[in-house]
Image (tube, rainbow, N blue to C red):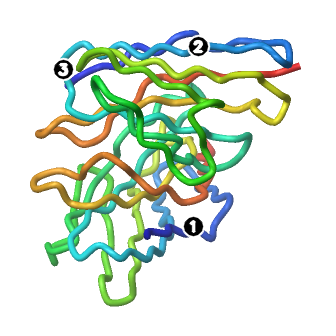
Amino acid sequence: SAVISQKPSRDICQRGTSLTIQCQVDSQVTMMFWYRQQPGQSLTLIATANQGSEATYESGFVIDKFPISRPNLTFSTLTVSNMSPEDSSIYLCSGRDRNTEAFFGQGTRLTVV
Amino acid sequence: AQTVTQSQPEMSVQEAETVTLSCTYDTSESNYYLFWYKQPPSRQMILVIRQEAYKQQNATENRFSVNFQKAAKSFSLKISDSQLGDTAMYFCASGANAGGTSYGKLTFGQGTILTVHP
């Protein structure tokens, strides 16, 4: 089955700065998604990363705060912009192809101080 | 719209015993999938089992099985012969049917922390 490599695994960032998280899939996938998992809570979908076009954001998430790129069918990035302590979470990317269910990267644990 | 509810924040079980995790859901989709994912301390989300909503037969994967009650919108996970490696957070999730798989855009429940004791 396909594997997603997500990095960084963890980071501690200063408030007001930005962090870009990368996900690399070892094969082409039709769909990629980004989730946020706040401490002790469930996963919430941030957006669907669309190849070659703007991402589709869920209610409560905006492009200025979480810009997403997907230049090809194997790679996507999520940037967390102008960070505040409330952005401290685990961020996960997932991929899905026609013959597979959603599979996930290892997650990025972000702490904003 | 889809909602998934897990009412058990924490569960514990002795090694080799059986435990059942509960999940209820609501969805506006006419055709959908239900899933159980496992998240150990490593944070890696691992698919445990999935159920197609239009199939009446309950899914089974080795020690893991589900009890799918469509009318009651209930989808519980039974883990038999529990092992120490089963210790993890378990998430129930739903997703629309894309024909053979879900679209991949999933709605998750709040999670249940399962601890298996030796």
Asked whether A89 or B17 is in front, the reply is A89
Q: Nearer the viewer, mark 2 or mark 1?
A: 2
Against B103, is A31 above or below?
above
Label 3, secondary structure: give it: loop
- Which of the two marks, 3 or 1, is nearer to us in this view? 3
Q: CA distance from mark 3 to mark 1?
A: 33 Å
Quarter-of-image position of residue A20 = top right
Residue type highlighted by circle 3: Gln
Name the foreground residue: A71 vs B20.
A71
In space, the residues marked 3 and 2 are separated at their CA atoms by: 21 Å
Identify the mark at residue A20; answer none if there is no mark: 2
Residue at horizontal 46 percent and vertical 51 percent from the top: B16
- Give the residue type that dot 2 points to: Thr
Point 54% across, 26% down: residue: A67
Residue picked out by circle 1: B6
Image marks 3 and 1: residues in contact by CB distance under 8 Å: no
